[in-house]
Image (cartoon, rainbow, N blue to C red):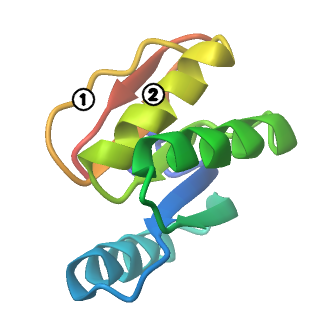
Amino acid sequence: MAKALSGKGEVGLIYHGADFPVTRQRYEGFKAIIAKYPGIKIVAEQGIAGPDFTGDAEKAASAILTSHPKVNGLWAVWDVPAEGVLSAARAAGRDRPVWRSQPVIWVQTSRSTWRRTDS
């Protein structure tokens, strides 16, 4: 994500609110890497606990996009909540992410185009 944002931007994180080792490691690892880029600011973080991970992530991402209109990157801890993030991005008019595997990271490369990146 840092590379795709050219080291500058605002990002929001959707993480697993339960204390599950794998998702906690992903979340902590992502934050540690982003901390190395002073031009990238994490402006919002929202945990989700399920059982509706997709719906909860959609609500969280929608709130982030509304509260922080300059967000140009969204990170979801795995593919199921990423579906909700995608839905929120579409509803906000930022609807062209490309995605594959986890963790899912979207970067807004223009006002209306989001794409997936690997780190």
Q: Callout 1: 10 Å neighbours few (<14), some, many (20+)?
A: some
Q: Residue 99: which disc?
A: 1
Foreground pick, 19 / 38 = 19
* Amino acid residing under circle 1: Trp
Q: Which of marks 1 and 2 is in front?
A: 2
* Residue 20: percent from left, percent from top: 30, 85
Q: Residue 86: which disc?
A: 2
Residue that appears at 46% across and 35% down: 84
The answer to whether the residues at label 1 and label 2 have Cβ atoms under 8 Å apart is: yes
- Give the Cα separation between the discs numbered 1 and 2: 9 Å
Q: Can residue 111 be seen in this view?
A: no
Q: Earlier in the sequence, mark 1 or mark 2?
A: 2
Label 2 sits on a secondary structure element that is helix
Residue that appears at 59% across and 28% down: 88
In the current view of this chain or complex, which residue is farthest to the right?
67
* 106, above or below 18, in the image: above
* Amino acid residing under circle 2: Leu
Foreground pick, 54 / 67 = 54
Q: In this view, does 67 lie to the left or right of 7?
A: right
Q: In this view, does 54 lie to the left or right of 40?
A: left
Snapshot quadrant of residue 98: top left
Label 1 sits on a secondary structure element that is loop
Residue that appears at 55% across and 49% down: 56
Q: In which quarter of the image is the C terminus?
A: bottom left
* Residue 91: percent from left, percent from top: 64, 16
Snapshot quadrant of residue 117: top left
In the current view of this chain or complex, which residue is farthest to the front?
51
* 41, above or below 23, in the image: above
Foreground pick, 82 / 99 = 82
Q: Is residue 101 left or right of residue 90?
A: left
Q: Callout 2: 10 Å neighbours few (<14), some, many (20+)?
A: many
